[in-house]
Amino acid sequence: MGNVIVFCESAGDSLKGSALSAIAAGRTAAGFHGGEVIALLVGKGVGAAADHACKYAPKVITVDDDRLETFMAETYAPVIANVAKANDASVIIGSANQTGKDVIARVAGILDAGMASDISAVESKTDYKRPVLAGNAYVTIEVSSDTTCVTVRQSEVDAAGELDAPGSASSAEAGEVNTFGAEVVRIEASKSDRPDLNEADVVVSGGRGMKNGDNFKHIEELCDALGAAMGASRAATDAGFVPSDLQVGQTGKVVAPNLYIAIAISGAIQHLAGMKNSKTIVAVNKDAEAPIFQVADFGIVTTWEEAIPQLIEEIKKVKAAS
């Protein structure tokens, strides 16, 4: 019997949406291994999210330590590995985002464990399904090691629902915190009142057809009207229109919001790989033959100069009426 440790990221007193998808995959894995799901929160102040985590996992462990205020894989990975060993974990799961990919691979190295990255489903005790070829095909990989480390694509796995009864929370010590010579010199982060791109229910992305960075202010206005996060194609970020952390696509962020609006984006396969699992896709492009229309649920063949003001006006009317 093996338990499943799910490394959960949190913000304030709540788990992030990516953590709920990881927990959902953890429940499936626990069913195959015969153990239970243990949600693990690591960092300074993570105890505030313990109650929320208990709604989704029967057991929650927090490692709340001031020395872990800033995320570093060098310091977090040993903590996760130690908790996994102490709780007889057969599987350690994290999200397939920047943080999860960084730390879970290091945990695999510490535990000499097999690794299944970017999975979309847990198919058996040893088999995991994952997308390849920019999401155009899927393969099943087998990991035969006694312990397996896994990262889960949030866009491929539905979020876990709440348990019938809340779980219990306990704490663990971080132990020695060794940076192995690494040092955080400074953190440069984009500050915005808009939702996080990975967590947003609505995303509006602009492409190279926006012509320049100044024109992205119109995308921002539409985002603010919808309460949406802003994204961009690689062509737009490579051109310097917007920062690279807004890139959606195969080499950027993979998102699956309830609504994705692609404006002036042709729909190259690399971009589609990052957003095609969105629940509803709306495309605005002046080229009726643009590939984006092949995956769009709704398409508007016009220029962004025509479409955006009209969309904002109609959204304001709907809000005023409600």
Image (tube, rainbow, N blue to C red):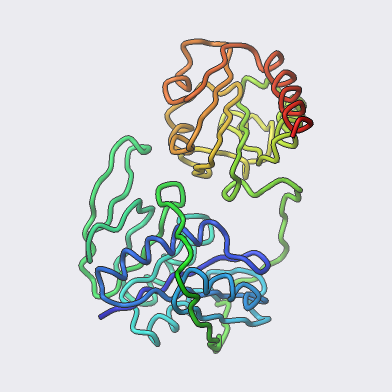
Of all residues shown, which one is farthest toward the front? 322
Q: Nearer the viewer, residue 104 or 21?
A: 21
The residue drawn where x is 71% and y is 29% is 219
Q: Give how far across and how far down residue 221 sits, in percent.
A: 76, 31
The residue drawn where x is 29% and y is 58% is 122
Q: Nearer the viewer, residue 147 or 315?
A: 315
Task: Name which quarter of the figure residue 184 lies in.
Answer: bottom right
Q: Nearer the viewer, residue 256 or 183?
A: 256
Q: Give how far across and how far down residue 32 sits, in percent.
A: 24, 68
- Asked whether, in this view, residue 190 is left or right of residue 286, the answer is right
Q: Is 83 located above or below residue 15 in the figure?
A: below
The residue drawn where x is 40% and y is 61% is 24
- Asked whether, in this view, residue 217 is left or right of residue 149, the answer is right
Q: Give how far across and how far down residue 74 sits, in percent.
A: 53, 73
The residue drawn where x is 68% and y is 81% is 66
- Asked whether, in this view, residue 42 is left or right of residue 213, the answer is left
Quadrant, the C terminus: top right
Q: Nearer the viewer, residue 153 or 116?
A: 153
Task: Name which quarter of the figure residue 265 lies in.
Answer: top right
Q: Give how far across and how far down residue 132 sits, in percent.
A: 32, 42
Task: Name which quarter of the figure residue 67 lies in.
Answer: bottom right
Quadrant, the N terminus: bottom left
- Asked whether, in this view, residue 196 is left or right of residue 275, the answer is right
